[in-house]
Amino acid sequence: MEKVTDWIQLWRDLVEHQSPEPERAAKPKGFHAANNRRWGKPDSTRDFVVAQLDSVPNATVLDIGAGTGTWAVVFAQHARRVTAVDSSPAMIEALKANLSAANITNVEIIAGSWPDIAVEPHDFSFCSHGMYGTPDLPAFIRRMEQVTRRTCFLVLRASTPDGVMADAARRIWGHPYDSPNFQVCYKALLQMGISPNVHMADSGLWSPWKNASLEEALAEIKRRFGLVGGEHDEFLTDLLRRRLTLIDGQYVWPRGVRSVLVYWNARQ
């Protein structure tokens, strides 16, 4: 009999195995600049979400894991009120500065970690890449539904199944999922009884990672998997040597990650 995967447990395992992303909290200006560069191009996900907001007069939006406010700034222009939630003091300071620079006054900022904070109901709830540190995905999602009158939105990364990280995960963990991502979340939502809609962003794959040397690339992949010791070093070094391309003195990873929008009616 084929083994049935517990996707909720797999999500928890992946969250607990991953190493933290230090650059998000430590470098909010660089984080915001990178987002702005990505948003300099047309994006079907942004267009779709904005269209949903525009269809509801005086809409209210809850932005979970708002970061430096890339999405909150857009929401504020299409909604009566936005509540932006983030747990990082550095991110919140950057968020305040960016809202002030854009002359936006209809965004309320709440410091705290979702789902452990109290907010009133909103028409829409939204989270862009802010759920990866939450091991209890059902608690995160159910709390979103509790405070959402209309639609819940999640934006997640989707990795290609033949990517470098997927190959490494197969060797290290026996499956292709290197981190919490769209594929695991989608199946976990189905396991929870939620039938989400999916919108694949048409803005293309994310910019590739780059390293100055194979040794640096090896250190990076080990950090992302939380590996200590050299048990997998030989395999990973060979994998990186075969799959990375040397361009202008840098080792460039294959482009293998894109954003996916998942959404559903909170009252389904």
Image: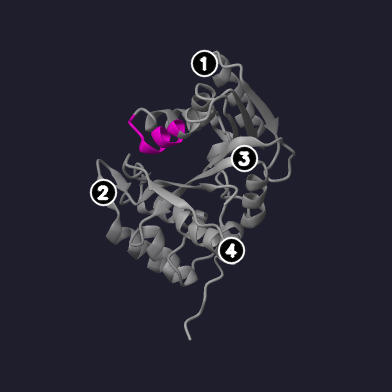
Please tell me which residue is depicted at 36% across the width and 37% down the height of the picture.
44
Residue 113, quarter of picture: top right
Residue 187: x and y in percent read 50, 62
Work out whether mark 2 precedes mark 1 in sequence or the reverse, and give the earlier one. 1
User: What residue sits right under mark 1 in the picture?
Assistant: 102
Decide: few, some or many residues near mark 2? Use Cα within 10 Å; few <14, some 14-19, many ≥20. some
Give the amino acid at mark 2.
Leu
User: What residue sits right under mark 4 in the picture?
Assistant: 8
Over which residues does the magenta segment extend?
A: 41-51
Please tell me which residue is depicted at 56% across the width and 64% down the height of the picture.
191
Q: Nearer the viewer, mark 4 or mark 2?
A: 4
User: What residue sits right under mark 2 in the picture?
Assistant: 246
Between 159 and 77, the one nearer to me in the picture: 77
**Residue 121: which disc?**
none
Residue 106, quarter of picture: top right
Work out whether mark 1 precedes mark 4 in sequence or the reverse, and give the earlier one. 4
Task: Report the Cα–Cα distance between label 3 and label 4.
Answer: 25 Å
Q: Do the numbered discs 1 and 4 sit on residues whose CB atoms are within 8 Å?
A: no
In the picture, measured across the screen, residue 245 lies left or right of residue 4, that is left
Q: Nearer the viewer, mark 3 or mark 2?
A: 3
